[in-house]
Amino acid sequence: MVRGLLAPRWLLVHLLAIAAVVVCFRLGWWQWDRSQESSGTLQNLGYALQWPLFGLFVPFMYWRMWKLDKERRAAEASRIVDAPVVDDAPKPRRSPTEWRTAAPADQVDDAMAEYNSYLAALSARDGE
């Protein structure tokens, strides 16, 4: 598991996550200082509380990405183990209509006959 976290892609994610947390908490500290100045407003105080929440969201998303990646790798591993042996021999080409056969002409389909009479009645009613 640790080996997967040391992959080049994950190293980049580690660096970005750490940088994002540091930046968010630094911005929260800066907004706190601004809110304590004479020109500070409630908006600065709100941002001072909001930026650390953004900073806490980063580790949550980091954990979520790690968990999904772990599940994906486990699914791929089980798929490889459970994969059936595939016969790669080319199969002869078949016509798309080869499987179809026409219905015998003397065979009467009661449902189709009833439907056709219903359509004929509708057509006659429309013609009136």
Image: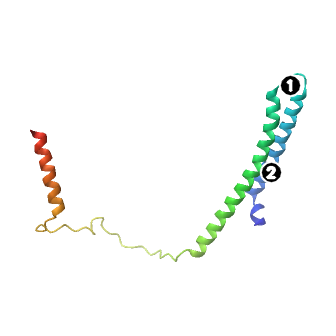
Count the numbered circles shown.
2
Identify which residue is drawn at 89% across, 31% down. 33
Report crowding for label 1: few under 14, some 14 to 19, many 20 or more residues within 10 A (C-alpha): some
Query: Does the residue at mark 2 contact the one at mark 1 (Cβ under 8 Å)?
Result: no
Q: CA distance from mark 2 to mark 1?
A: 33 Å
Identify which residue is drawn at 13% across, 66% down. 108
Horizontally, residue 89 falls left or right of residue 39, namely left
**Percent of width and height locating residue 42:** 81, 27
Front one among 61 and 72:
61
Report crowding for label 2: few under 14, some 14 to 19, many 20 or more residues within 10 A (C-alpha): few
Q: Among all residues in the image, which is located at the extreme front?
A: 42
Residue on which the image places disc 1: 40
Whichever of callouts 2 and 1 sits on the residue coming sooner in the sequence is 2
Residue on which the image places disc 2: 15
Question: Which quarter shows the C terminus?
Answer: top left
**Percent of width and height locating residue 88:** 47, 74
Element at label 2:
helix
